[in-house]
């Protein structure tokens, strides 16, 4: 439960958000698909964890080409998840438990099955003609430009009915909306008002940095990966801030919302423009820079391991740039990313590294996001077969790499390390086979085979589990203003094994975070400036070891300690 600070309109600065991937959270009606009533069943668990907000991935009507990010009706729910009454019941139950709910707003594109698109493709001048981005072919039928799409192939598909191409930055089934069209923007704002008046507490806004395109639709230079060439003309475009300030005037400022923009291809300077409170756009954005430090020559699907110095550099850039203007979101993983323990921690020291990843993230300045299962220390999922992967992105990469003749074991390795399906395996509620309390019928996607060792029931029984460490981190954020407001300072930037930073409140209270990212026992020399005039006491230690502050600390593998000043 959050303490109230002087400015309750900024409640989202003290909040901790928990991301629920509805189809993989809990199946209440025995069809193998998670649903809204399943979330209601688990509200007591979320309340116990102490989170303040739930972010639900899209629950609207969708053909599920991209797991709901292809919406065919913004006002109807995916019947697999339940009815509007079920959602109203979930909202009421959550609110009674002082938990808010934000929805995923996917308004850069719709499904090609949306009525708007069905009408738009029919004619150049009906009501919906300009709701999407249509371009004539070149003299010999050439594509409008050289952009590729995220999930493979060109970003343009030809429609004979209309004798034009339409733009799609993701799948062909996800036609791009034309935000230049005022009627489209008005229709989006109307829909947003509907959900906010329904009782929703805000939105996570899918690829919102893409909604304004450069109207000359320029070719991308070949520095862009083919599948990301749309970034050249479609990210942080000329009118993106105009549109968001209009959205704020027309909708958001009339409600007490949490808004977080997903802003691919956006740097920390640009992020300030989206999140500076004086600009009346969004509360915060998701940064991608720390998601790219382990990208290889082929981008995400590579087996390159991140290094800690790069990670510290990226976190420090965003902490410093947004320390006074704007606000950071903080996350290790989500439904698009592999599991944090495998990617940034250690499967050998799974519990220790899960706790330390939690400590580092939750002691930074910003709003932390917990992806479902992260609080259990879940790892990536060792699927037996490439055919077990369901995600359109992973399947297209597997096809591409097989066409390139890459070795099967390399393809399996990068799928294991980077597939979005790692995050989408069903939530393991118990150790019972075969479906760990998620469902009593075969789920839509394979379980992570390690659910007998990693599941909620066992975590709740074990007072030293990752769950209780996350519970403490969330409670500390609600109790200590220094965690919400304190100024971040990095120390020992070049240390390749240890992440050391402080947070300093206006009243002088300081936190000192020392976190090992090493599988070895380390003797760590605390930076000179932190030894001497402060009296440090242990606030939170990821290991059970009795530790007192001194200038030479022995750190166990992946041990993290938070000290707080007593003077
Ligand atoms: O993701 C946008 C995005 O940038 C992703 O393509 C991400 O970079 C990629 O998946 C990393 O591998 C949003 C949604 O979060 C994602 O689930 C959707 O597939 C995508 O938009 C299209 O809506
Ligand atoms: Ca179900």
Image: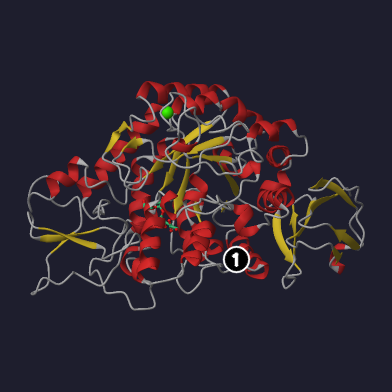
Residue 261 or 8: which is nearer the viewer? 261
Q: Viewer-proximal residue, 548 or 378? A: 378
Q: Which residue is mark 1?
A: 314
**Front in this rendered view, residue 339 or 84:** 339
Residue at 33%, 31% in the rendered image: 77
Indicate whether 341 appears above or below 98.
below
Relative depth, front residue between 428 and 213: 428
Report the residue at 70% width, 51% height from top: 350
The answer to whether residue 554 shows anywhere in this view is: yes
Q: Secondary structure at mark 1?
A: helix
Quarter of the figure that contains the N terminus? top right
Residue 567 position within the rendered picture, expressed as x and y whole percent measured from the top left: 89, 49
- Position of 19 compared to 218: left or right? right
Lateral position of residue 303 relative to residue 223, left or right:
right
Q: Quadrant of ligand 2?
A: top left
| Residue 287 visible, this orientation | no
- Give the percent coordinates (x, y) of residue 75: 29, 32
């Amino acid at each position: 439960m959050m303490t109230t600070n002087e400015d309750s309109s900024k409640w989202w600065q003290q909040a901790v958000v928990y991301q629920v991937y509805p189809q993989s959270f809990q199946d209440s009606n025995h069809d193998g698909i998670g649903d809204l009533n399943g979330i209601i069943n688990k509200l007591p668990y979320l309340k116990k964890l102490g989170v303040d907000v739930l972010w639900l991935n899209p629950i609207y009507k969708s053909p599920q080409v991209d797991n709901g990010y292809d919406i065919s009706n913004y006002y109807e729910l995916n019947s697999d998840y339940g009815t509007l009454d079920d959602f109203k019941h979930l909202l009421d139950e959550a609110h009674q438990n002082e938990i808010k709910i934000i929805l995923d707003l996917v308004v850069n594109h719709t499904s090609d099955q949306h009525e708007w698109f069905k009408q738009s493709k029919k004619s150049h001048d009906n009501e919906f003609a300009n709701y999407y981005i249509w371009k004539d072919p070149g003299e010999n039928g050439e594509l409008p430009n050289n952009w590729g799409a995220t999930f493979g192939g060109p970003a343009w598909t030809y429609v004979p009915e209309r004798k034009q191409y339409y733009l799609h930055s993701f799948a062909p089934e996800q036609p791009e909306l034309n935000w230049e069209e005022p009627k489209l923007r008005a229709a989006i704002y109307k829909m947003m008002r509907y959900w906010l008046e329904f009782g929703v507490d805000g939105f996570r806004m899918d690829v919102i940095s893409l909604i304004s395109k450069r109207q000359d639709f320029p070719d991308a230079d070949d520095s862009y990966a083919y599948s990301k060439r749309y970034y050249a003309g479609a990210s942080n475009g000329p009118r993106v801030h105009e549109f968001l300030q209009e959205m704020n005037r027309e909708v958001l400022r009339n409600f007490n919302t949490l808004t977080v923009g997903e802003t691919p291809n956006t740097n920390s300077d640009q992020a300030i423009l989206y999140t500076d409170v004086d600009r009346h756009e969004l509360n915060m954005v998701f940064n991608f820079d720390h998601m790219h430090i382990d990208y290889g020559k082929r981008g995400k699907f590579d087996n390159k391991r991140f290094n800690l110095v790069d990670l510290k550099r990226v976190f420090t850039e965003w902490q410093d740039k947004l320390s006074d203007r704007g606000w950071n979101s903080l996350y290790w993983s989500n439904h698009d990313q592999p599991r944090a323990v495998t990617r940034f921690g250690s499967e050998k020291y799974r519990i220790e590294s899960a706790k330390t990843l939690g400590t580092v993230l939750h002691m930074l300045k910003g709003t932390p996001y917990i992806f479902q299962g992260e609080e259990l220390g879940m790892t990536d999922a060792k699927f037996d077969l490439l055919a077990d992967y369901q995600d359109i992105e992973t399947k297209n990469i597997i096809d591409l790499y097989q066409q390139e003749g890459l070795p099967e074991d390399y393809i399996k390795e990068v799928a294991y390390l980077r597939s979005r399906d790692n995050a989408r395996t069903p939530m393991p509620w118990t150790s019972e086979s075969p479906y760990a309390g998620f469902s009593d019928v075969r789920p839509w996607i394979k379980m992570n085979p390690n659910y007998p060792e990693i599941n909620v029931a066992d975590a709740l029984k074990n007072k030293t589990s990752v769950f209780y460490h996350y519970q403490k981190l969330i409670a500390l954020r609600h109790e200590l203003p220094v965690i919400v407001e304190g100024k971040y300072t990095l120390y020992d930037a070049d240390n390749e094994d240890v992440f050391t930073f402080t947070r300093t409140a206006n009243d002088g209270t300081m936190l000192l975070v020392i976190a090992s990212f090493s599988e070895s026992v380390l003797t760590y020399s605390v930076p000179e400036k932190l030894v001497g005039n402060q009296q440090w006491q242990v606030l939170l230690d990821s290991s059970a070891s009795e530790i007192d502050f001194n200038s030479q600390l022995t750190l166990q593998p992946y041990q993290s300690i938070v000290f707080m000043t007593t003077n």
